[in-house]
Amino acid sequence: MSRTGTPTDNGAMEAINGWIKSEIFTDFHITNNENIQDEIAAYIHFYNENRPAYSLNYLTPKQYKEEFANV
């Protein structure tokens, strides 16, 4: 937990919040706040299971975990 009004205390979490906001509102075209919790849950599922990541050699986090968990 960061101190109130000091988002730089937790830069990783702030980055994730920024990605979620950016991608949900621009890529998924969410225009209102109805069912926003459902949209966030759907985005987390998409992020972990469908969205390839450059830093993971274009694997999804789920694929990366499955491939390297037994190493």
Image (cartoon, rainbow, N blue to C red):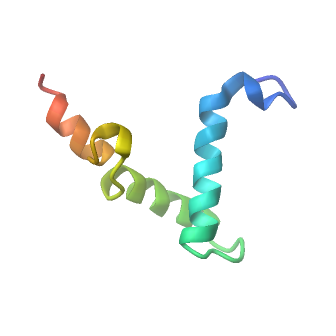
> Does 69 sit left or right of 58 as displayed?
left
Name the image quarter holding residue 54. top left
Taking the image as drawn, is residue 1 in sight? no
Name the image quarter holding residue 66. top left
> Does 63 sit left or right of 54 as displayed?
left
Name the image quarter holding residue 26. bottom right
- List x then y, in percent, for residue 42: 46, 63
Instruction: Name the residue rendered at 58%, 54% in the picture.
Output: 20
41 shown above or below 10: below
Q: Residue furthest left?
A: 70
Q: Quadrant of the C terminus?
A: top left
46 shown above or below 35: above
> Does 35 sit left or right of 54 as displayed?
right
- List x then y, in percent, for residue 34: 68, 74
Instruction: Name the residue rendered at 24%, 39% in the picture.
Output: 64
Total labels: the figure holds 0
Q: Residue furthest right?
A: 5
- List x then y, in percent, for residue 65: 24, 36
Q: Nearer the viewer, residue 2 or 56?
A: 56
Instruction: Name the residue rendered at 48%, 60% in the picture.
Output: 43
